[in-house]
Amino acid sequence: TYTEINNPVKLAHLIIKERIDKNIRACDMTAGNGKDSEFILKNLNPRMLYSFDIQKKAMENTKNLIGSCPNFKFILDSHDNIDKYIYEKIDLFIFNLGYLPRGDKSITTNYKTVIRALKKSLKLLNHNGLIIICVYPGHESGRLEGEFLEEFMENLDQKIYQVIKYDFLNQVNNPPYLISLRKL
Ligand code: SAM
């Protein structure tokens, strides 16, 4: 079968499916409505998935979508507090930035907490592990996130991390794009 790649979330899922071994530990750093968490649980059957969000609505939506599942834990807290909850190595992090789809658009991720969360994620990332970040530069806080993330990530040591930006070149209005990082 052929998956048409017309948005970065599809691309993120494809990369995750292709490049991550099964039996992993994963973190969804922005659970939202739970679609990414559901994708990870269905396709990778991880040993454990931790999903963070700061909104009760996101927690409800994600839990409703997923149901009861022994290898899934929702954490109602900001992703930059990850070090309060997780002490084991993680193979996959996904950040899908911005606001809750069909939710309160005034509550969005922001570059300060995202960069802090990313730095902590790098410490927890297993060898050969993957961090996938979907950036939405079409709104102001998304544009800032993109700028700060790129500045931070383009300065990471290439002997330790492979960082790739996947961008749609001929779409108007600052389309979303993807950054993937693999620890070598
Ligand atoms: N992955 C989700 C899905 O598949 O439905 C979409 C995520 S949505 C674009 C972004 C989410 O990030 C929102 O639900 C928002 O509440 C959450 N968020 C914002 N700031 C956060 C923070 N500091 N820590 C964790 N989640 C945060």
Image (tube, rainbow, N blue to C red):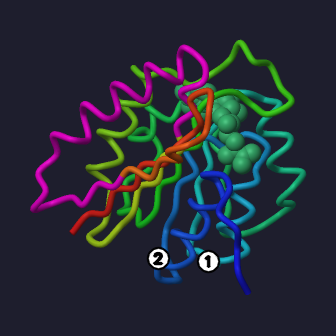
Upstream in sequence: badge 2 or badge 1: 2
Q: What element carries label 1?
A: helix
x, y percent for residue 9: 64, 53
Q: Is residue 42 above or below residue 159?
A: below
x, y percent for residue 146: 42, 30
Q: What element carries label 2?
A: loop
Q: From the image, tell me which residue sits under label 2.
A: 20
Q: Quadrant of ligand 1?
A: top right
Q: Is residue 66 above or below residue 152?
A: below
Q: How far apart are marks 2 and 1 (CA)?
A: 8 Å
Residue 184 is left or right of residue 30, and the answer is left
Discs 2, 1 touching: Cβ within 8 Å: yes
Q: Look at 40% across and 36% down and name the residue there.
A: 117
Residue 39 is left or right of residue 170, and the answer is right
x, y percent for residue 18: 51, 79
Q: What stretch is highlighted in magenta?
A: 135-164
150 within the magenta span: yes
Q: Look at 82% across and 50% down and name the residue there.
A: 63
In the picture as drawn, the residue positioned furthest to the bottom comes out as 1
Q: Is residue 89 above or below residue 143?
A: below
x, y percent for residue 170: 55, 43
